[in-house]
Image (cartoon, rainbow, N blue to C red):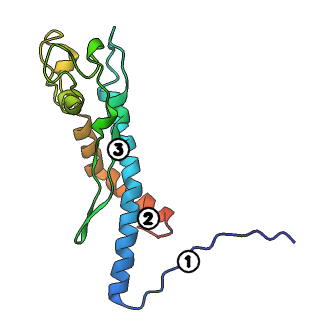
Amino acid sequence: MNLSRRKVKRMAIIRTYSQLLIELEKAKNIALAKSAEKTVELVKVEINKEVYSEPEGDYQRTYQLRESVKDFPLEIKGRASEIKIAHDTGQIVSNASVFQHGSNYWSPSDYSEYLAETIHGGLSGSLFGTNKHWHKPKPYMDNAKAEMLNGQYRKFMMESLMRSGYNVI
């Protein structure tokens, strides 16, 4: 006889409406945290399309813009829960001597903190010429947000809830 051990998930015992609300909040927050990981990947795909699809010539890319995208810890504000998806600018390293995320020709020479906004909005100055692809907006965050509003958020949450054992329709 072959007996295998299965990990059995302990079910919450709910006796009151307030206990039900507490368990639903927990499930929502777990699903939201798992959905954030997928959202980070969605933003990275958009960065690949909008930013890294352009050839750069002599400039050596670091890919730190893409790799700096992360989900920040869940914040609970009353009944609302929120996870911020943004760049961790501490992961973007400036090397002004080779014009990576900065330059010795402007201030501040370390431009890491402003890099995402500059690329997203096409706000680059004229130091490297005019009417180049880096002067055009590359709205990767706006694109990811639009995808989330068009159903990706719902899909991510449903998948996360189902993986946690909930039947979702």
Amino acid beneath label 1 = Arg
- Determine whether 21 is above or below 109 in the image: below
- Residue at image position (29%, 45%) is 147
Amino acid beneath label 3 = Lys
- Residue at image position (14%, 11%) is 127
Q: What residue does disc 2 label?
A: 161
- Residue at image position (29%, 28%) is 50
Residue 80 circle label = none
Q: Secondary structure at mark 1?
A: loop
Q: What residue does disc 3 label?
A: 70
Q: Are marks 2 and 1 in contact (CB under 8 Å)?
A: no
Q: Nearer the viewer, residue 41 or 153?
A: 41
- Determine whether 71 is above or below 124 in the image: below
Amino acid beneath label 2 = Leu
Quarter holding the C terminus?
Answer: bottom left
Q: Position of residue 126 (x, y in %)?
A: 12, 13
Q: What residue does disc 1 label?
A: 10
Which residue occupies the extreme right position in the image?
1
* Disc 1/disc 3 C-alpha distance (Å): 31 Å
Left or right for 135, reference 33: left
